[in-house]
Image (cartoon, coloured by chain):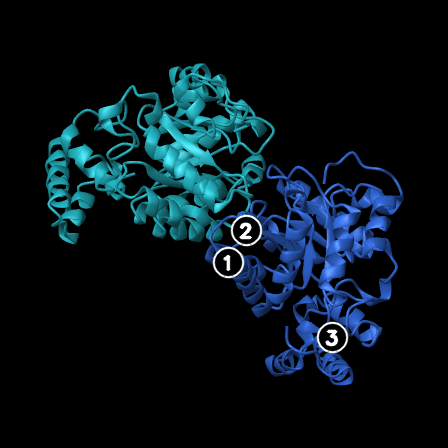
Chain colours: A cyan, B blue
Amino acid sequence: MKALPDALTLENLLAEVGEAILAGRLDAAALRRAEAAGAHDAGPYWGSGAGGGVLAAAHMQGLVSAGACRLGVCCPDPLRVGDLASYLDHTLLKPEATVAEIDTLCAEAIEHRFASVCVNGQWAARCAEILSGSGVLCCAVVGFPLGAMPSEAKAYETSRVVEDGACEVDMVIPIGSLKSGDDAYVQRDIAGVVAAAHRGGARVKVIFETALLEPSEIRRACELAVRAGADFVKTSTGFSKGGATIEDVRLMRSVVGPSVGVKAAGGVRDRDSAEAMIEAGATRIGASAGIAIVRGETSGSSY
Amino acid sequence: MKALPDALTLENLLAEVGEAILAGRLDAAALRRAEAAGAHDAGPYWGSGAGGGVLAAAHMQGLVSAGACRLGVCCPDPLRVGDLASYLDHTLLKPEATVAEIDTLCAEAIEHRFASVCVNGQWAARCAEILSGSGVLCCAVVGFPLGAMPSEAKAYETSRVVEDGACEVDMVIPIGSLKSGDDAYVQRDIAGVVAAAHRGGARVKVIFETALLEPSEIRRACELAVRAGADFVKTSTGFSKGGATIEDVRLMRSVVGPSVGVKAAGGVRDRDSAEAMIEAGATRIGASAGIAIVRGETSGSSY
């Protein structure tokens, strides 16, 4: 990651971009100036990341509403810190999901003001279009859920979904390579996805599948993800033998430090467990049970 | 698929190519002549496909040994028809598989003379190198196991693994699109993978995940796969709620006819069930329990 810009410079530039968007006169030059100032690296989430609380909330709200996630500064919305819904990636990844179910997912996410919808890549373009201007992001998974495709294919898939409108990309590491001790391969694999995503202004969450890893492997994966420029680390795909645990979230937060996000996913089905994950250091929750979570109910869903 | 060439023409051309490979004097022109004559489409498997039994086995054995799977005529080896091992794709797809486990898989496949090893794409180059000249093919999965990445990414991933040495590509259809009635999307998705694979001389098996489909959907998927030029249809990934059933294999065979392969995968763990699948019309079996199957034992493995 680039060094963070001076906060005041960044704030001024973002304010300018925000006004330009709102006035309908955004031009490429303003975006480039913001990018050159490091807007993309302003911190992966509001509230505890570098830059959080510095930028004028009113400007940011305007940017969010205008769909300016490409500036990398809109998740979750700073006006909603403390709002549980703003932590939730509303998730539907089962392969048999129909277009009608995807549309419903988006409508629910807009209604409940979730941080994003998290979908398979084939739906990214559709979701991005539906969500445009809503303040809800489109998040697409890559190399999912096994993480074992060639690195070049993972990077290409990333470019593709970002071009289709995904603002966030949840990728899976090559777990077998980590287990084989090939840390260089793992870091390159992540870095390829990060480069492709950041080129398009999108963030990357790096999924470890913690249920398959020893604590020492989780620690190594965190270090590699941070070195590769990841914006978030994430526990699980929801397709393996186990999901997020409090212990794993706590360990991940302790290794990545305060400036990288931690997403807890897999098995979070009610408000209590979501709040426990946040307490342990999670800044995002992946769940198909988002509505039950915000309503304080319990879902029977397995993700 | 192109119309099949005259069998004698094809045999003569393949014999010429085979001799050229064995003599170390293969040139691009000979390969082009064989391809122009339709060598690629000589039938997806020996024994019951068009062209089976016509070509001189001795020449074919030479081609197989020389690693000439790119001609599309070497699986399984015609000298081994009736040999259960030649029906088996020796499979290791769990994401945490280490490089040592992949190497063991290849060694076992060579020892038992399985049709192929079936692995995740990140291992294709390694497996292809280890298997080179053994007569065992490298098969890589694509869009696996959800089938829900953008079609362009699936086609790119195919090119990548074929370039890395995969002779066979097992892809997953966009199941949600099939369920949504978007048959045109499904056919295009498959056709993109088929084009990328055939360009590199590799075959395509199209996975439906039959446990998620109604019989009418399986039928439609078969028709779309055949129209898109698939070489095989395949029941399951091994990562969903169920694997191959006799009924599904029988249905798929009845729809695709005799000139397209049928691969039964998922839950085939012993010789009896493997033979029952072949009896129902399967021409390839995907299993992690290949060794138990050929030895007449039962495996506890779930794939």
Q: Residue type at mark 3?
A: Leu
| Alpha carbon distance from label 3 to label 2 | 41 Å
Secondary structure under tag 3 reads: helix
Q: Are marks 1 and 2 on the same chain?
A: yes
Q: Residue type at mark 2?
A: Pro
Q: Mark 1 highlights which residue? A: B185
Please report contact status of discs 1 and 2: CB closer than 8 Å, yes or no. yes
Secondary structure under tag 1 reads: helix
Q: Which mark is residue B174?
A: 2
Camera-side mark, 1 or 3: 1
Q: Work out whether mark 1 precedes mark 2 in sequence or the reverse, and give the earlier one.
A: 2
Q: Work out whether mark 1 precedes mark 3 in sequence or the reverse, and give the earlier one.
A: 3
Image x and y of residue B59, in percent: 80, 75
Query: Which is nearer the eye, A166 or B83?
Result: A166
Quadrant in which residue A170 is drawn: top left
Secondary structure under tag 2 reads: loop
Q: Work out whether mark 3 precedes mark 2 in sequence or the reverse, and give the earlier one.
A: 3
Q: Are marks 1 and 3 on the same chain?
A: yes
- Give the side of residue A169 with respect to residue B44, left or right: left
Q: Mark 3 highlights which residue? A: B22
Neighbor class of circle 1 (other Cα within 10 Å; few <14, some 14-19, many 20+) is some
Camera-side mark, 3 or 2: 2
Q: Is residue B88 visible?
A: no
Image x and y of residue B209, in percent: 64, 47
Q: Which mark is residue A161?
A: none
Q: Are marks 3 and 2 on the same chain?
A: yes
Query: Which is nearer the eye, B136 or B132?
Result: B136
